[in-house]
């Protein structure tokens, strides 16, 4: 297992009890290097949206657990935030919650000579999604999707 995947997995195991205790939802955990710095990001949400006080509560409780476990060798910056408007779709529950909404996807490999699609998520089942694009239904395998997120409509 890659180092960053192991850190994400262990962090998720530490933060999940905190999230569940406060009736939040864990959206994602990522450990990434940007420039010279490592970032450990936790994205959480709740009905009606997460606020700064919620993020501080999660951050302080998680920070104490991370310090006690001390399994991350690199210096890193811990960030706890909402997933934002363009919420990523990564898990089955994310896709199911987004049925009927407009989503953007980017594929690893081109389909019909393109890699990016925007459409209404019509269905999710067994690792496949159906997007309605210009009144046509197109099926995609989720394992072929590099990125999926809710569309930002302004």
Image (spheres, rainbow, N blue to C red):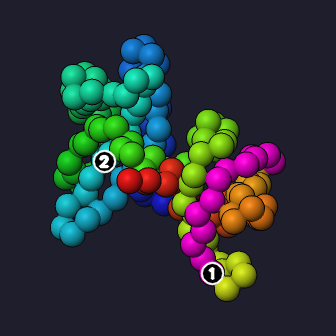
Please name which of the two marks, 1 or 2, marks the residue nearer to the observer.
1
Instruction: Indicate the quadrant containing the N terminus: top left, top right, bottom left or bottom right.
Output: bottom right
Residue 99: name its quadrant.
top right
**Residue 125's spot in the image, x, y percent?**
79, 46
Q: Disc 2 on helix, strand or loop? A: strand
Horizontal and vertical percent position of residue 102: 57, 52
Q: Quadrant of residue 148?
A: bottom right
Compare residues 91 and 149 and report the one nearer the observer.
Answer: 149
Label 1, residues with CA under 10 Å away: few <14, some 14-19, many ≥20 = few
Q: Residues within 10 Å of mark 2 (few under 14, many from 20)?
A: some
Res 71 label: none
For the point 67% across and 85% down, which residue is it?
Answer: 113
Mark 1 secondary-structure assignment:
strand
Residue tagged 2? 40
Observer-nearest of 26 and 121: 121
x, y percent for residue 93: 63, 37
Residue range highlighted in magenta:
114-126
**x 40%, y 24%: residue:** 48
Between disc 1 and disc 2, whose residue precedes? 2
Residue 11, placed above or below residue 121: above
- What residue is rendered at 38% in x and 53% in y? 154
Q: Is residue 130 left or right of residue 151?
A: right
Q: Which label is found at residue 114? A: 1
Magenta span dominant secondary structure: strand
Q: Residue 101 placed where, x, y %?
A: 59, 45
């Amino acid at each position: 297992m890659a180092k960053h995947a192991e850190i994400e997995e262990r962090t998720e195991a530490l933060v999940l009890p905190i999230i569940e205790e406060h009736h939040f939802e864990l959206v994602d955990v990522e450990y990434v290097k940007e420039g010279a710095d490592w970032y450990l990001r936790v994205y959480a949400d709740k009905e009606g949206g997460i606020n700064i006080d919620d993020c501080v509560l999660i951050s302080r409780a998680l920070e104490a657990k991370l310090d006690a476990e001390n399994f991350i060798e690199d210096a890193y910056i811990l960030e706890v935030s909402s997933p934002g408007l363009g919420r990523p779709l990564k898990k089955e529950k994310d896709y199911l919650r987004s049925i009927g909404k407009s989503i953007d996807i980017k594929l690893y490999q081109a389909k019909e000579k393109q890699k990016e699609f925007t459409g209404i998520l019509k269905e999710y089942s067994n690792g496949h999604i159906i997007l309605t694009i210009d009144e046509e239904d197109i099926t995609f395998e989720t394992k072929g999707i590099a990125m999926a997120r809710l569309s930002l409509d302004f």
